[in-house]
Amino acid sequence: RKRILVTGGAGFVGSHLVDQLMLQGHEVTVADNYFTGRRRNVQHWIGHPNFELLHHDVVEPLMIEVDQIYHLASPASPVKYMYNPVKTIKSNTIGTINVLGLAKRVKARVLFASTSEIYGDPEEHPQKETYWGHVNTIGPRACYDESKRVAETLMYAYSKRDHIDVRVARIFNTYGPRMHMYDGRVVSNFIVQTLNGHPLTVYAPGNQTRSFMYVSDLVSGLMKLMNSNYSLPCNLGNPEEHTILEFAQLVQDITGVKGKVSMKKSQQDDPHKRKPDITVAKTQLGWEPKVSLRDGILKTTAYFRKELGLVN
Amino acid sequence: RKRILVTGGAGFVGSHLVDQLMLQGHEVTVADNYFTGRRRNVQHWIGHPNFELLHHDVVEPLMIEVDQIYHLASPASPVKYMYNPVKTIKSNTIGTINVLGLAKRVKARVLFASTSEIYGDPEEHPQKETYWGHVNTIGPRACYDESKRVAETLMYAYSKRDHIDVRVARIFNTYGPRMHMYDGRVVSNFIVQTLNGHPLTVYAPGNQTRSFMYVSDLVSGLMKLMNSNYSLPCNLGNPEEHTILEFAQLVQDITGVKGKVSMKKSQQDDPHKRKPDITVAKTQLGWEPKVSLRDGILKTTAYFRKELGLVN
Ligand SMILES: NC(=O)c1ccc[n+]([C@@H]2O[C@H](COP(=O)([O-])OP(=O)(O)OC[C@H]3O[C@@H](n4cnc5c(N)ncnc54)[C@H](O)[C@@H]3O)[C@@H](O)[C@H]2O)c1
Ligand SMILES: NC(=O)c1ccc[n+]([C@@H]2O[C@H](COP(=O)([O-])OP(=O)(O)OC[C@H]3O[C@@H](n4cnc5c(N)ncnc54)[C@H](O)[C@@H]3O)[C@@H](O)[C@H]2O)c1
Ligand SMILES: O=c1ccn([C@@H]2O[C@H](COP(=O)(O)OP(=O)(O)O)[C@@H](O)[C@H]2O)c(=O)[nH]1
Ligand SMILES: O=c1ccn([C@@H]2O[C@H](COP(=O)(O)OP(=O)(O)O)[C@@H](O)[C@H]2O)c(=O)[nH]1
Ligand SMILES: O=c1ccn([C@@H]2O[C@H](COP(=O)(O)OP(=O)(O)O)[C@@H](O)[C@H]2O)c(=O)[nH]1
Ligand SMILES: O=c1ccn([C@@H]2O[C@H](COP(=O)(O)OP(=O)(O)O)[C@@H](O)[C@H]2O)c(=O)[nH]1
């Protein structure tokens, strides 16, 4: 039984991770500023003796005593991280410095939620951990991509200097219940549009690709990585790749709701393809995703149906 | 006449910039923590009514009233920036945030000293400003490269959000008097080795290239950029490219001192080539370097001769 801090634990991924950690009997503390997360995501644990919820912004120092830290605090969807780029950068730079300062003081192991976005618009396909990436320092996505990149650098710089035990997960597109309905990510957009009978907005050209992982697969990967001996960056993602146009069709097929596609103008610096090479996770952690796109989309659709008040 | 802050103004480049700004009659404040700089570099201005020297670390907030800021505070040579990678990252992230916070409050224009290192080990040659770069987030140079990259991102993020007037100079290898003798950069190493009669240490393979700019050229470029209307990143460098082995020979030819070359093992992630495309600086600023390698090396050698006590 460990004392575990989850920064960003009231968010989409964080709250599912908290569920698993609580079920394993750990003492879990969540630190979240509720920028994109909400208390409701962890409501079911409030009052539990092993659970503590801190209204805390990681840009400020935090003094607590813990054994492990999952550092997830950062907006994750393009719409949200572009809302205040300065704040996004502060969360990932000053926020990560504070988390590492804490880890140093209490000798905790830290896992950082990095992202496939550190590969930018990749020129290597699929992306291996050894790929250095292709990012525009002054583009609209830079506040997220570059601050996640330097946060990785910080992880290893502190690790080397202060002998902190670090883990770096490079997370690829993940979806599931508790995604915010209106954060602009493609999975939530398409499902909500389908349920509302609105056309599915595909940003041109439509042949850009993504690979979608269901959230329970990610959570098991994060926990395996944290408790493994592997300290280099590790991709966590589902290698099943789809174009966005295909995906629009799949969502309709799976939900059984026929919709229209409406082509929208392309987004600046939108990565053309993205697909993880997960050899490292397979061999080092014995991990691979298990949930099919069909099952995942059905579960997510059921969640959004409830959120939209379409069922009781 | 302007009130001008130069962070890192007691360093090599900063002190030459201070000289020119003082000669133009501005009020100049230097903020420096003396990590790699020294009071001696600006000693000749101490006591001048237009000059102020603050012993200040940019990782801490600074409250002063100024019209322009040249933000140069950061170690610059690989040996120095790798000495404490965490501190290097803090200087370029938290330091830049503080400088931008200051600029926002006093409505000052800020020029950031970025670097050719943001291009990493480039796959495009020569490097144009539109090139996105090729950097290893977890390599030994990452603390410098990645923190300079995200500092650029911060410049434009603040600029957009808070309407701060920003300038970003991507500086290529620069040399001249007041370089530190033992900071490990190739120009100081080779000249000092030559003067001491020691073998010139060439790191394998030796056919890696660099392009060397004399410091007075850089200073004129920085001032032109600051006072121009051009706000996108701008390369400042000398496009004359040499392999390091050639350069070892050139230093001996120019100084007239015959030495030996000693091959040393290669450095991890050492960029293979580097040469600026300076079309932007030429067309937007009417700037190009003027000092020949021969003249620059002779001046620098004269400086090191004095430093080594070889002349009076
Ligand atoms: N979901 C994905 O597809 C994906 C992909 C790659 C990486 N990631 C990373 O995983 C992590 C979680 O992502 P998510 O999808 O759950 O996003 P999310 O927005 O649902 O969760 C992020 C949480 O962090 C909190 N937060 C943001 N800034 C904070 C700050 N300064 N201080 C304290 N809390 C703060 C938010 O309130 C939210 O609860 C993020 O770090 C994200 O970058 C997610
Ligand atoms: N010289 C080059 O070839 C070159 C090339 C590219 C970019 N640059 C950039 O130009 C700037 C000046 O470089 P330089 O060659 O004069 O190096 P330098 O080391 O001589 O000067 C840097 C100065 O900044 C000061 N400093 C460092 N960290 C600080 C902190 N946290 N707070 C306050 N002061 C701090 C140092 O004491 C020093 O006086 C740097 O930002 C560097 O990255 C230089
Ligand atoms: O329990 C702790 C210990 C440190 N920090 C913060 O972590 C940051 C980085 O810590 P570090 O030890 O690197 O700071 P330094 O000693 O280098 O200033 C500092 O701003 C601290 O305020 C924190 O939030 N909680
Ligand atoms: O309503 C939407 C939202 C997104 N996208 C596209 O879907 C992909 C994934 O976008 P998302 O915002 O989910 O995450 P990203 O992987 O870009 O961070 C990108 O190519 C977007 O341009 C789309 O076509 N329609
Ligand atoms: O004159 C000033 C104004 C601000 N800052 C610092 O600049 C940083 C960033 O300022 P910003 O306004 O972005 O801070 P925020 O208001 O977002 O906290 C803060 O840490 C301030 O301490 C400073 O050093 N001098
Ligand atoms: O004593 C030295 C110092 C540097 N170099 C090489 O010279 C180039 C320039 O190195 P420097 O440290 O001056 O700056 P960089 O451009 O790498 O930041 C690099 O390829 C180094 O490997 C060398 O051969 N001998």
Image: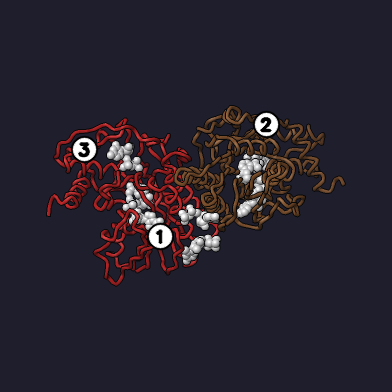
Chain colours: A brown, B red
Q: Which residue is mark 3?
A: B250
In the figure, is residue A195 to the left or right of B283?
Answer: right
Q: Quadrant of residue B46?
A: bottom left
**In this picture, is B65 found above or below A115?**
below
Position of residue A13 measured from the top left corner of the image (x, y, whole percent): 67, 44
Q: Quadrant of residue B62?
A: bottom left
In the figure, is residue B290 to the left or right of A217?
Answer: left
**In this picture, is B91 found above or below A293?**
below
Disc 1 and disc 2 on one polypeptide chain: no
Q: Residue drawn 46% across and 48% down?
A: B147
The amino acid beneath tag 3 is Leu
Q: Nearer the viewer, mark 3 or mark 1?
A: 1
**In this picture, is B114 found above or below B162?**
above
Nearest the eye: B28 or B237: B28
Q: Residues within 10 Å of mark 2 (few under 14, many from 20)?
A: many
Q: CA distance from mark 1 to mark 2?
A: 47 Å
Q: Is residue A188 visible?
A: no
Q: Which residue is mark 2?
A: A289
Position of residue A33 measured from the top left corner of the image (x, y, whole percent): 64, 56
Q: Secondary structure at mark 3?
A: helix
Q: Residues within 10 Å of mark 1 (few under 14, many from 20)?
A: some
Q: Secondary structure at mark 2?
A: loop
Q: Nearer the viewer, mark 3 or mark 2?
A: 2
Compare marks 3 and 1 and give the one earlier in the sequence: 1
In the figure, is residue B5 to the left or right of B153?
Answer: left
Q: Which residue is mark 1?
A: B57
Q: Is residue B203 visible?
A: yes
The circle on residue B239 is none
Distance from mark 1 CB to nearest ligand 2 atom below 8 Å? yes
Question: The numbered mark 3 sits on a residue in which chain?
Answer: B
The amino acid beneath tag 2 is Pro
Q: Going by the picture, which residue comes out furthest to the left?
A: B312
